Image (spheres, helix red, strand yellow):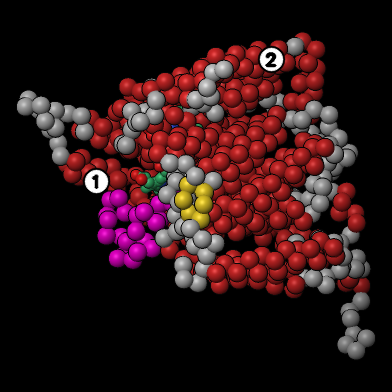
Amino acid sequence: MMPLDHGTIVAFAKSWGLFYLIAMSVGVMVYALWPSNRTRFDRAKTSILDKDDKPWS
Amino acid sequence: MVSNLTMTERRLAVVILIVLSLVGLTMSVAGRADLMGTQGFIVLAFSVGLAFVVMSDFYSPTPDPKRLERYFDDPTKAGIVLSMIWAVIGMFVGVWVAALLAWPDLTFDAAWASFGRLRPVHTSGVIFGFGGNALIATSFHVLQRTSQGGLPDQLSPWFVLIGYNLFCVVAASGYLIGVTQSKEYAEPEWYADIWLVIVWVVYFLIYIRTLARRKEPHIYVANWYYMAFILVVAVLHIVNNLAVPVSFGHAKSYSLFSGVQDAMTQWWYGHNAVAFFLTAGFLGMMYYYLPKRAGRPIYSYRLSIISFWGITFMYMWAGSHHLHYTALPQWVQTLGMTFSLVLLVPSWASAGNALATLNGAWHKVRDDATLRFMMVAAVFYGLATFEGSFMAIRAVNSLSHYTDWTVGHVHAGALGWVAMITFGSIYALVPWMWKREAMYSPKLVEVHFWLALSGTIIYVFTMWNSGIIQGLMWRTYNESGTLAYSFIDSVSAMHPYYIARTFGGLLFLLGAAVGLYNVLMTIRASRMELAQAEGDADIPLVATARAVQPGE
Ligand code: HEM
Ligand code: HEM
């Protein structure tokens, strides 16, 4: 068993920290660029324009 | 505004204020031998004063249930006015602090007016008072419009806005009497910190509850930024302020961290305060008000998502660039430096996205000072982030650290980005909120714009100049290998720059004062039009047909 000291945490941060950030960025890119999401995003960006100033309408 | 609350909400408001005044009373009794006593009296006076406001309207008729079919904008309106008032206060103190550096006698021998006490009044006044109120006000507006749903209840938004301002008042008055935790941007002591946690949790719950009831399936990107702002500020605030008070009757507390851990925690907080208070929330503003005002959708929605996650995840690791050449392990400094450099990519993606949105609408930017505020904000955002990434490089930081270059960078971001995007958004929002075609005076918006822009340019250029001169003077050696200039030489070399900076700041302050006047006059004009409209309706159409006889 490795003792849980400064060195262990540094090793963990330097290895897994890198992997999770890479996985995160890949995930975000896939979500943002996924072709079928395009319609949703286009709707979202135009939906804020020309809205009545009333809820639930 | 109280008259829009239901009877239950009014009763609850009174209960909250009674509890709060009891807290104030307890603080002033338990802390009577300490500065905390004075802070207690402020809490007491604040809550009793507000209780009078609620009571005076307590028995006004209950509101029309039809109001629930409209958005709930009262707290947004109050927040806009509070934000502009704090802007004038915070910037007035900023000009004072700037003047102190040029003419140190301006403390008038009063302890409360010393540099060390006024400076945090400036930083908290502008960041939390001006910026925070603007963020709360606009977030309620954007949240409701983009989810097409009203806020879940009427009391909790008021609790957040007023509770937050109580925090600001306790903070600023505390600095003047000498209360401080000596952590930059986290100066308020433990009791104020606990209060802010309560307010902030309610704020977050409002967001979640409104989103849960939304009609619009997709959550618009501006809300992501506002939510990141709320959530991360909560985490930062709680962790950095973990402290043990000397006793429950003492204002003073001691941090749970010490040494280099304390420094790293503080600058992890400090840098993410820049990222999530001064950047994420204001990006939320930009992603809503800029497209709205320009009448064009954001250039690339995909890019806005990618830059959101980029900013959110990269900023977290950049804090150590504030601690180059310290006891912090070298690899942590390098990590901070590297992430700061990569951070430029999502930052410029946001700035570029904003400018590309305006591409094709440049004639609007030319004619409309409100949109021009937002355009200039995007440019300065690009500039400040480029500069920041550059200053994060260890070798560059060895020149810039401790100098006015840092202060120049701060205000390129604070004046050029934070204040400009806020003013632009407020000028867009005020006519919508008070149902008018435009601001009371579009000319004064134009005047404000030029005052703000020239003030920013003067401020930033003088600080770049003085900062680099300072840095170079501190590292110039003569033939015998000793320093060529004494420290005091570098201080006197700064004198002309400090005068120029004070002047630039004064212009910026004047602009903010013009803005406050314009907002207040717009509100007045809207009230008068409303009164007029009601008055008109009361005049019979055949008024002149017959003279009214006395005694009829
Ligand atoms: C009228 C305009 C303003 C003037 C004249 C002004 C002046 C100053 C001065 C003299 C300092 C102290 C610098 C030092 O210690 O050497 C300072 C610090 C600071 N100001 Fe301002 N300021 C203004 C507006 C603003 C605004 C609008 C913001 C934020 C939105 C802001 C944020 C800050 C911050 C964060 C610091 C601390 C900087 C650091 O520690 O490096 N200021 N300001
Ligand atoms: C990519 C973005 C950015 C990076 C990498 C960055 C980097 C830096 C660096 C290296 C420093 C100097 C630290 C030192 O020598 O002590 C600094 C200070 C500062 N920056 Fe930035 N910056 C960025 C964006 C911004 C923006 C947009 C704002 C503001 C609105 C801002 C506000 C500040 C403040 C307030 C300080 C002074 C902190 C203090 O010492 O009190 N930064 N930044």
Task: State the mark number for residue B495.
Answer: 1
Magenta span includes B309: no
Magenta span includes B112: yes
Mark 2 surroundings within 10 Å by alpha-carbon count, few (fewer than 14), some (14 through 19), many (20 or more)? few
Q: Residue at x 80, y 23 (%)?
A: A43
Q: Position of residue B314 (x, y in %)?
A: 55, 24
- On the picture, is B162 further left or further right than B146? left
- Residue B192 visible in image: yes
Q: Main secondary structure of the magenta part?
A: helix
Amino acid type, mark 2: Gly
Marks 1 & 2 on one chain: no
Towards the viewer: B495 or B536: B495
Q: Position of residue B506 (x, y in %)?
A: 40, 50
Q: Which residues are drawn in magenta?
A: B100-123
Q: Residue at x 77, y 56 (%)?
A: B155
Question: Label 2, on which residue?
Answer: A27
Q: Find residue B103 and report its image quarter.
A: bottom left
Q: Say which quadrant the N terminus of chain B sits in.
A: bottom right
